[in-house]
């Protein structure tokens, strides 16, 4: 069964906090959060196990205290043979679907990469004026979209896995073109 991406919220390790997960539960949001594996989590991984799916209680013992019951699951890392990637979720996960959920989570990195590449086009400013900062950001998004379009056109109309035109070369081309 392939998970539906548009109905789930995928959050990175920065959101792996009891209060965040408890709030998502209270809002009845379906989520998958990349987890920092604790010793207790790692103990659930038996020798040679491919995947782990188990009930787990996230707890914060310091003030303000909190706890929330979730499902923890781990799948083998794609490149490191002896490592696993850990997640917590409120979804029904089976050993058979754990890899599909991990693959759906991995697809979110396209968004992360896009934001980082938008930064390649973002002019530097120290202006505290919101309208100036907003204009610079929207201009950077427009340049990013032009860069994506240029790469699609250079790839014959398909979305390339590796862009043939780097952001650095594209910026150089845009800046050095005489528009007179």
Image: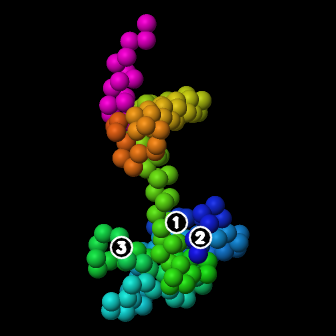
Q: Is residue 42 magenta?
A: no
Query: Which comes before the other along the chain, label 2 or label 3?
Result: 2
- In the rendered image of this protein, does residue 113 appear above or below residue 67? above
Rate crowding at label 2 as few (under 14), some (14 to 19) or many (20 or more) other CA atoms within 10 Å.
some
Q: Whole-Å distance between the Cαs marked 2 and 3? A: 19 Å
Which dot marks residue 3?
2
In the image shown, does 28 or 128 lie closer to the viewer?
28
Q: Which of disc 1 and disc 2 is earlier in sequence? A: 2
Circle 2 sits in a helix, a strand or a loop, which is it? loop
Residue 136 at x, y = what percent?
51, 30
For marks 3 and 1, give the CA distance: 14 Å
- The quadrant where residue 47 appears: bottom left
Coordinates of residue 44 in the picture (x, y in percent): 42, 91
Q: Disc 1 designates what residue?
A: 104
| Colour mode of the rendering | rainbow
Query: Is there CB contact under 8 Å for labels 2 and 1?
Result: yes
Q: Is residue 79 above or below residue 55?
A: above
Marking on residue 77: 3
Name the residue located 48 percent from the left edge and 34 percent from the top edge.
149
Q: Residues within 10 Å of mark 1 (few under 14, many from 20)?
A: some
The kind of secondary structure element at disc 3 is loop
- Taking the image as shown, residue 130 lies to the left or right of residue 173, namely right
> In the rendered structure, which segment of residues is drawn in magenta?
167-180
* Mark 3–mark 1 CB contact (< 8 Å): no
Q: Residue 50: which quarter of the image?
A: bottom left
| Image spot of residue 143 (x, y percent) | 48, 31
Quarter assignment of residue 155: top left
Q: Closer to the camera, 130 or 65?
A: 130
Q: Residue at x 46, y 45 (%)?
A: 159
Q: Nearer the viewer, residue 103 or 40?
A: 103
């Amino acid at each position: 069964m392939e998970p539906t991406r548009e109905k789930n919220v995928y959050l990175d390790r920065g959101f792996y906090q009891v209060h965040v997960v408890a709030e998502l539960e209270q809002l009845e949001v379906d989520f998958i959060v990349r987890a920092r594996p604790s010793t207790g989590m790692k103990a659930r991984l038996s020798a040679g196990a491919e995947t782990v799916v188990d009930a787990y209680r996230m707890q914060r013992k310091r003030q303000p205290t909190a706890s929330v019951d979730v499902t923890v699951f781990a799948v083998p890392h794609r490149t490191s043979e002896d490592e696993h990637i850990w997640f917590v979720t409120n979804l029904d996960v089976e050993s058979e679907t754990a890899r599909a959920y991990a693959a759906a989570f991995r697809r979110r990195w396209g968004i992360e990469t896009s934001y980082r590449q938008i930064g390649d086009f973002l002019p530097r400013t120290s202006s505290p004026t919101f309208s100036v900062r907003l204009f610079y950001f929207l201009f950077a998004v427009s340049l990013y979209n032009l860069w994506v379009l240029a790469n699609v056109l250079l790839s014959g109309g398909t979305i390339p896995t590796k862009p043939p035109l780097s952001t650095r070369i594209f910026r150089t081309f845009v800046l050095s073109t005489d528009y007179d």
